[in-house]
Amino acid sequence: MFVASFSVVSPSTEISICLGFSESVREGGSFVDSSRFISRSLCTKFDARFKGRKQRSSCSLNADLNYSCLGGSENTNKFPVLSSLIANPGGEIAISSEQKVYDVVLKQAALVNQRLKSSGDLDVKPDIVVPGTLSLLNEAYDRCGEVCAEYAKTFYLGTLLMTPERRRAIWAIYVWCRRTDELVDGPNASHITPMALDRWESRLEDLFEGRPYDMFDAALSDTVANFPVDIQPFKDMIEGMRMDLKKSRYKNFDELYLYCYYVAGTVGLMSVPIMGIAPESQATTESVYNAALALGLANQLTNILRDVGEDARRRRIYLPQDELAQAGLSDEDIFAGKVTDKWRNFMKRQIKRARMFFDEAEKGVAELSSASRWPVWASLLLYRQILDEIEANDYDNFTKRAYVSKGKKLIALPVAYARSAISPSRSSTLVKA
């Protein structure tokens, strides 16, 4: 579910779901080595594997306009977010960021429910493989695993707890997200243009249609063919990169919410069908997706609060401008980097919001398949502690980087294991009506 949110393309995208999925996206430098890509001619063998495969039909749902950002009207008073409908200066009604994202959540949940009704589970089904392609496909997945092991050691170890099929699928998603991130944060980021991102999106569409360009694409193409993964979150992540190319200020939380979804919440939606929902869970599929989204948002907000100083040195401010003004702060105060009482009060409110999203995310972790719960719990608990460290630094996120010590990480692991042992039937607060 939540492998996710490794917040790609973020101010300092290191979202860590499933034991540091996102941190690993950014750390370790560039891994893309074109000399190790599978050749175009070899990829024609992969084409044969996907040709003729029936494409999943997408569904269009009209969401109830009365929900809040996560999980329906019952949550209306839980989050400091905007209403689902807002009026623009011209007097016209515009859809808020929360509703835009929620519409995507509904579509993903419907896709999974459709698969469950037709097959009874989400496990990978045996497929007829064109002779000669199986070894190439295995090689593609193995290469994805090597990338994860090299650049995301902790995350890689967490994936070993999963079934082989789920493990390989998560590797493929991780590699695509890392490559996507490197378009805007890698060695050639200064040369990336909107047109280049358009080409990357076109290539994404091709692999979803069973036309992979290289070895890594082939692994993801196989993954999305076998699991109910929709293309929209992948496209939305690319949209987050477009936003980072042209935007360095966010006038309110509604704008920031959408950005956090693009660069972090998307990975949660990609990963839910891979991580799997426990068969005994009584929660709705939609509610589990909501929790995955909440974890991605919480992690990204935590990143933003941790890296205020680092982002300011790049002349970027990922904080709601209207809330800064209400606190009596300006961009110049951020660039000056002084911890004042105004700054402390502002930070307390921002940390409170992030913790609210973590609280919402916790409701869904217990609904995951048993093999996925421990790594997700561990990452959630560890990342949440970054907020504690910001407080311990007296809210000085200008010159000090909040991090969780190795000792605290070791303590968190058995706590996470104990929580993962609680079955959904006993812990669920997201039960079906």
Image (tube, grey):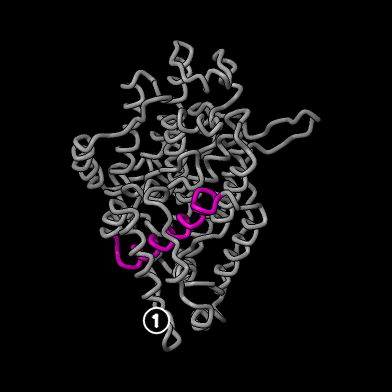
State the residue at coordinates (72%, 37%). 94
> Compared to 227, does 288 lie above or below?
above
Residue 5: give x, y in percent of width and height: 44, 47
User: Which residue is denoted by mark 1 in the rendering?
Assistant: 134
As for residue 16 lying within the magenta part, the answer is: no
Q: Residue 332 location in percent, x, y?
A: 57, 19
Q: Quadrant of residue 256?
A: top right
Residue positioned most to the top: 341
Part of the protein shown in magenta:
162-189
Evaluate whether residue 282 shows in this view.
no
Q: Is 63 in front, or is 163? A: 163
Give how far across and how far down residue 67 sits, in percent: 57, 36
Query: Overall secondary structure of the magenta stretch?
Result: helix
Q: Is residue 193 left or right of residue 170?
A: right
Placement of 90 over or under 271, stated as above or below: above
Instruction: Left or right? Give the position of 138 relative to 112.
Output: left
Residue at left 49%, top 78%? 39
What is the secondary structure assignment of the residue under circle 1?
helix
- The correct choice, above or below, for 183 with respect to 332 in the image is below
Residue 172 falls within the magenta-colored stretch: yes
Q: Nearer the viewer, residue 183 or 354?
A: 183
- Farthest bottom residue? 131
Identify residue type, mark 1. Answer: Leu
Badge 1: few (under 14), some or many (20 or more) residues near its Cα, within 10 Å?
Answer: some
**Quadrant of res 235:** bottom right
Comparing 339 with 379, the one in front is: 339
